[in-house]
Image: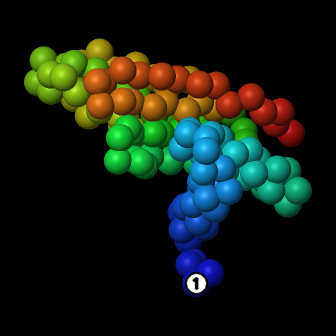
Amino acid sequence: MNGNTDSQYIFALLLSQSKFNKQRPPEYALGSTLLTLLEMAKRYQVEASANVVFSDGHRLIASRFATTSPPASLYWIRDDPTFPKSVIIASEPLFIGNWIACPENSIISVGADCEIQIEQIYCERG
């Protein structure tokens, strides 16, 4: 691989996990990617943080993840009067509204119907 940023390597790992787990949803590939990062961070005794956002063409998928607490912030808002029938995910609230913080070490996915699913990533830190 010719990349030189952590984002490029994380994306390559995500693509690899997606290819290896073709029958599973993209949220599974992201969870596997993050748990691999956790194991690598433990092995090399470093900290890792990964707010990842991507789409599979049908839904938006994001993570708020870190090997130490607290991870970088990640917020979402749905059906704001300025942006009805939509969901916005951002590192910080972009405007005044009913922003909700994503839980630490979680994956959030948003379908075309704006339905939100949040799954916790269970991992042992340390």
The correct choice, above or below, for 104 with respect to 52 in the image is above
Local secondary structure at mark 1: loop
Task: Name the residue rendered at 88%, 56% in the picture.
Answer: 43
Picture coordinates of residue 81, whole percent (x, y)? 12, 17
The image quadrant that residue 68 belongs to is top right
For the C terminus, the image quarter is top right
Identify which residue, 88 or 113, lies in the foreground.
113
Task: Name the residue rendered at 35%, 47% in the picture.
Answer: 57
Left or right for 6, reference 78 = right
The correct choice, above or below, for 39 with respect to 121 in the image is below
Picture coordinates of residue 71, whole percent (x, y)? 60, 37
Amino acid type of the residue tagged 1 in the rendering:
Asn
Task: Name the residue rendered at 82%, 50% in the picture.
Answer: 39
Left or right for 11, reference 105 = left
Image label count: 1
The correct choice, above or below, for 104 with respect to 14 in the image is above
Picture coordinates of residue 20, whole percent (x, y)? 68, 56
The answer to whether any part of residue 5 appears in the image is yes
